[in-house]
Amino acid sequence: MELLNSDKKNKVLQSMINIIDAKRSEIIAENKKDLDAFKRDDQALYDRLVVNEAKVDDMIQAIKEVKAQEDPVGKTISDRTLESGLNIQNKTAPFGTIMIIYESRPDVTIEAAVLAFKANNKILLKGGKEAYHSNVVLEKCWHEALAENDLDKTWIRLMHINREETQEFLRNPTEPLDLIVPRGGERLIQFVKEHAKCAVLISGRGNNFLYVSKTADWAKSISVILNAKTEKISGCNALDKVLIDKNIPNYEAKVKELASVLENANVEIIVDKDIKSVLSDKEEVAGKEVWHEEFLALKILLAEVDGLDQVIEMINEYSGGHSASIMTSNKAEAEKFMEQVDSAAVYHNASTRFTDGGQMGVGAELAISTDKLHHRGPLGLKQLVTNKYYVFGDGHVRV
């Protein structure tokens, strides 16, 4: 694959900024076609689909931020000369071709492409049918930006294939693929892992937990829970489960207060059998599958726990490995929680809503990875490269 210089890549990104700004009315009009065709039975998916003036501004800002970042390709990781005189350099290098499969979210067509391209990767974009018109017009913008700078449109391509054809492509790709990032439900992720012929980086579900310790500041806990649950229900970093230590002072009164606050915010509450004794009018959790569920709705599960060890065990068993938070004034307790909970992001006295590239200082993100290879958390520009060894000799042979 050709290595483009930074100036060339940045010129493409500047062209894209200008094109999107000039065509914002057309982009919003095409998005309206998708919105009009969408059955609003899934509010979270609908929210992700919307493109308005503010969203176009966000797209432009994402491109500007990536354009301003240092090119991640060709950076020296190590450089050493052995006693034999052999010089060995390890440098960052592009993956090659990345494929991303995603639902709704036309902004991913911008963020995924800008990150992949700046890291000198080609990218195949497989968006959902619900965002068809939005994605097509954004692909046209990318192709215009590439053409303005004498580059082939194969750098950034929208895959115009249906679900069955996508599955067949994964089984038998008709072109080289180096990395696949699935952003969707469990069935999609499992299928990709099973059938992909290349590396797969998992962008997993949320199902995020928060633990209220017996030493927690209660007022701060309520504020954090409310923010994590209601600030954006469609976010994969939204809160789903709250575990309340039964040893907290004024336990029953505080549980009732939390329930009242959540109800005032129109949050549906379900409870475990222990909390049911305090909130008798609430529906009791039906089965284990609910503990594994990512709600993506104004819905929350409240449960009673007895100490940190139980909390760690529950989170590691049921959560999606995305984000988990502890509310406590005990630093040792927080440290144990953060070290032993197996999630991509762990929090002390803070909302899970901060698991986001922009909020974490990474900038635009391809996805939030819950995988351990090769990176966990926001996949920003620096995470879209691999490495390559350059070995320089002078007729060296191994003996």
Image (spheres, helix red, strand yellow):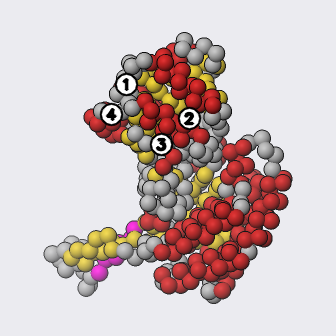
Q: Main secondary structure of the magenta part?
A: strand
User: In the rendered view, does 168 fall on the left or right side of 200?
Assistant: right
Which of pointers 2 and 3 lies earlier in the amino acid sequence?
Answer: 2
The residue pinned by badge 3 equals 351
Q: Secondary structure at mark 4?
A: loop
Which residue range is magenta in the image?
387-392
Q: Residue 234 placed where, x, y %?
A: 63, 45
Q: Which image quarter is the C terminus in?
A: bottom left
Q: Which three-letter amino acid code belongs to the residue tagged 1?
A: Lys
C-alpha gap between disc 2 and disc 4? 23 Å
Query: Which mark is on residue 214?
Result: 1
User: In the rendered view, does 158 fall on the left or right side of 32?
Assistant: left
Which of pointers 3 and 1 lies earlier in the amino acid sequence?
Answer: 1
The residue pinned by badge 2 equals 240
State the residue lying farthest toward the left: 83
Query: Which mark is on residue 329?
Result: 4
Q: Residues within 10 Å of mark 1 (few under 14, many from 20)?
A: many
Q: Is residue 58 visible?
A: yes
Q: Secondary structure at mark 3?
A: loop
390 magenta-colored: yes
C-alpha gap between disc 4 and disc 3? 15 Å
Instruction: Tell us which disc is closer to us: 2 or 4.
Output: 4
Which of pointers 4 and 3 lies earlier in the amino acid sequence?
Answer: 4
